Image (cartoon, rainbow, N blue to C red):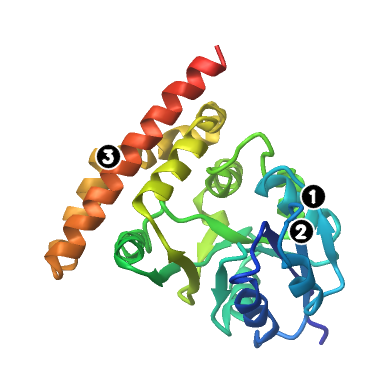
């Protein structure tokens, strides 16, 4: 019996420091029928040279991830698509488990793959702790594995949205096909946070939040956005696991402080974005 082809799409931008680890993890998947596509946003380092060691399907496209991802899918041949970032690495069984899961029921359209962070330094540890609270939380996890038919039907990622596009596409699928459409597996993706600085993390939130109104105005996103954008909902989630939060008190307090700073930066970005777009 022929196995379905899975197209793995990896958008890149100056990713040379960590890309090889990502591509090697795709190469080592237990599932044999994989097509690897790298879509680069005009990197100035040797990202494309590294990518060409693993695939001859390396393209240039910008200006942001949503456009890169859509372009990769448009140039793919798979029955399924898996979208991952260049700073991620996959457990060996990720693709195989996703294919098995989505084939269990014709109502299944997309699969959530939980993420675990790693990196260097104190703030990377804080990010690891933060992400650990989101596993299994439906308003904080987003699908990355899709049937090609549903991806095409939904017209892929909304290219007007940057930063929240991971949530937007699955939530549009869920709105049309109800919650059963989005399933999850328990095999992990590992997200390389590298060496985070608090300032850069806040700058990132500020940048993405300037366009968040484009995400909020999509009807499918409104309900979950109320929790995603609520600092109270986030604190409530953290405090619902006090032993995890305060097992290492310094790390727990650092994580809460970091998240508070990010919310503040995001709030300022949102306000400035609203002013710009008036």
Distance from Cα at disc 2 to Cα at disc 1: 6 Å
Q: Is residue 96 visible?
A: yes
Element class at badge 2: strand
Residue 245 appears in view = no
- Mark sitting earlier along the chain (1/3): 1
Is 266 left or right of 234, judged from the image as shown? right
- Marks 2/1 in contact by CB < 8 Å: the verdict is yes
Q: Earlier in the sequence, mark 2 or mark 3?
A: 2
The residue that appears at 44% across and 30% down in the rendered structure is: 269
Question: 141 or 105: nearer the eye?
Answer: 141
Residue 269 vs 23, above or below: the answer is above
Q: Which residue is mark 3?
A: 231
Q: Report which quarter residue 43 is drawn in.
A: bottom right
Mark toward the viewer: 2 or 3: 2
Q: Position of residue 151 (x, y in %)?
A: 72, 52
- Identify the secondary structure beneath mark 3: helix
Disc number for residue 38: none
- Cα distance in 3D space between marks 2 and 3: 35 Å
Question: Is 102 positioned to the left or the right of 131 in the image?
Answer: right
Residue name at image x 58 percent, y 44 percent: 165
Give the numbered dot on residue 39: 2
Mark positioned earlier in the residue sequence (2 or 1): 2
Q: What number is the disc on residue 61?
A: 1
């Amino acid at each position: 019996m022929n196995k379905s082809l899975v197209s793995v799409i990896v958008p890149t931008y100056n990713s040379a420091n960590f890309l090889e680890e990502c591509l090697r993890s795709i190469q080592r998947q237990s599932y044999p029928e994989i097509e690897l596509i790298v879509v680069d946003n005009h990197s100035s380092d040797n990202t494309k040279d590294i990518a060409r060691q693993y695939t001859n399907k390396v393209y240039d496209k910008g200006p942001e991830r949503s456009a890169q991802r859509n372009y990769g899918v448009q140039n793919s041949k798979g029955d399924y698509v898996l979208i991952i970032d260049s700073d991620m690495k996959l457990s060996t069984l990720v693709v195989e488990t996703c294919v098995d899961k989505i084939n269990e029921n014709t109502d299944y359209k997309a699969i959530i793959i939980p993420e675990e962070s790693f990196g260097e330094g104190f703030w990377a540890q804080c990010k690891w702790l933060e992400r650990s609270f989101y596993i299994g939380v439906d308003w904080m996890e987003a699908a990355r594995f899709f049937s090609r038919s549903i991806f095409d039907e939904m017209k892929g990622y909304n290219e007007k949205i940057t930063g929240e596009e991971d949530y937007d596409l699955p939530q549009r699928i869920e709105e049309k096909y109800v919650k059963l459409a989005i399933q999850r597996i328990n095999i992990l993706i590992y997200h390389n946070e590298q060496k985070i600085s608090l300032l850069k993390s806040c700058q990132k939130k500020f940048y993405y939040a300037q366009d968040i109104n484009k995400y909020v105005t999509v009807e499918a996103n409104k309900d979950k956005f109320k929790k995603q954008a609520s600092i109270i909902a986030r604190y409530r989630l953290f405090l619902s696991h006090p032993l995890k939060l305060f097992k290492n008190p310094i790390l727990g307090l650092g994580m809460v402080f970091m998240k508070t700073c990010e919310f503040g930066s995001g709030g300022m970005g949102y306000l400035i974005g609203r002013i710009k777009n008036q």
